[in-house]
Image: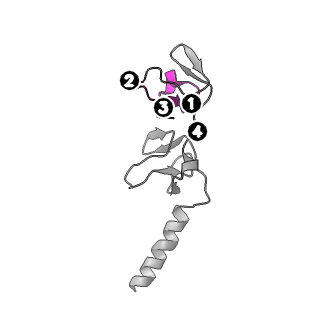
Amino acid sequence: PGQHREEALDVMLRGLCSVDGECVFPFWYRKEKYYDCVKLNAKHKWCSLNTTFSGYWKYCAMSDFAPCAFPFWYRRLIYRKCTEDGEVFGRKWCSLTPDYNRDQVWKYC
C-alpha cells in the first residue's frame, strides 16, 4: 500500500510540475503579480505555467528566469543595458518591464 501511494503521488506531481512547460511572466498568485521565479512556500524558486496560477508550475532552471526588458525607462533616462544607477551598493541591475518608473520590478544582472 505505501508504494502504491508513492507512485500515485509521483504521477500527480509530474502532472503539476511539467518539466516541458514554460514559465509565464508575469503571473498572478494569491492576488499578487510576479515578474520572475519566486521562492514562496518552497525550498527552490518556481514559476507558474499559467497567467493566473491554477496548480500548474515547475521549479525554475537558469533559462527560466525572467529576462531584462531592454530598453527600459528609469527616472528620466532610457537604458539599453544593465545599470548601477540608483543602486546603493553599486551592483548592476535591470528592469523586468519596459517602464521601471511605473512597475518597479527589477533584478540584479
Q: Which mark is residue 97?
A: 1
Q: Secondary structure at mark 4?
A: loop
Q: Position of residue 75 (x, y in %)?
A: 50, 16
Q: Is residue 32 magenta?
A: no
Q: Is residue 92 magenta?
A: yes
Q: From which residue to which does the magenta span run?
A: 87-107
For image coordinates 38% across by 23% down, the residue present is 88
* Residue topped by disc 2: 88
Q: Secondary structure at mark 1?
A: loop
Q: Are there few (<14), some (14-19), or many (20+) residues within 10 Å of tag 1?
A: many
Amino acid type for the residue under numbered disc 2: Val
Q: Which mark is residue 67?
A: 4
Q: Secondary structure at mark 3?
A: loop
Q: CA distance from mark 2 to mark 1?
A: 21 Å
Q: CA distance from mark 4 to mark 3?
A: 12 Å
Say above or below: 15 vs 105: below
Identify which residue, 45 or 90, lies in the foreground.
Answer: 90
Q: Are there few (<14), some (14-19), or many (20+) residues within 10 Å of tag 2?
A: few
